[in-house]
Image (tube, helix red, strand yellow):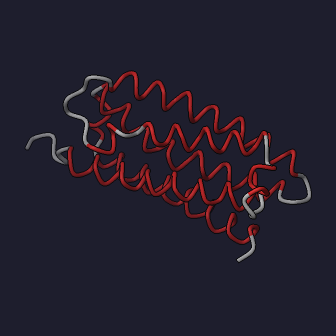
Amino acid sequence: MDTSTFYALFSATCFTLTGLWWTVVERHEHWLSDTRTRREVASVYLSFLLPALMGLFAQIGGTDAPMFWRASFVVIAVFGAVTTVRFLRAARGDGRAGTVARHWWASLVGYGAVAVLGVAPGIARGVGVTPLQAEATILVLLVALAHALVWEFLTHHRTDPAA
């Protein structure tokens, strides 16, 4: 599969996951009344939205305008890293956090790698792949981590506020 097709499918899938998450949240409005839970809901939302945006910008820039996708990846990755740090700081010492939430720093590593490859794409070429292929691999791992976060969130939170 060429990277253009991958990013088209990837971006569409991530935007779909973002929409599905909105639907889940809409059915559980009580999640938004608690600051901690609202922060976790937002973290899941960004975990799908940010890779979706990167995939979209990769399609726009592609190999024809590499500076476009590289700059957009760096900006979005920095935003993702900053929001992840804020989430981690807020969740520090929270005994209710599950395994994935306690290891959410892994997404920070992923965003850092995306930003580094955006600035220095030659790193990817040094290991025999194109920069867009390397970025795609990292984005897939970020979305897999996001899926784990969703699973943990849904299995650790009651779905019925009256229960």
Left or right: 123 in relation to 24: right
Residue at image coords 56%, 44% = 110
Percent position (x, y) of residue 145?
Answer: 43, 52
Asked if 85 appears above or below 162 in the picture, the reply is above
Q: Residue furthest bottom?
A: 1
Q: Residue furthest right?
A: 64
Asked if 59 appears above or below 45 in the picture, the reply is below
Left or right: 31 in relation to 10: left
Asked if 66 appears above or below 95 in the picture, the reply is below
Q: Residue furthest left?
A: 163
Task: Please identify the quadrant where the C terminus is shown.
Answer: top left
* Number of callouts: 0
Give 152 or 31, whichever is nearer the viewer: 152
Left or right: 25 in relation to 129: left
Residue at image coords 31%, 54% = 151
Task: Please identify the quadrant where the N terminus is shown.
Answer: bottom right
Residue at image coords 29%, 46% = 153
Residue 102's quadrant in the figure? top left
Give 124 or 30, whichever is nearer the viewer: 124
Residue 117's quadrant in the figure? top right
Percent position (x, y) of residue 150?
Answer: 35, 51
Give 76 or 28, whichever is nearer the viewer: 76
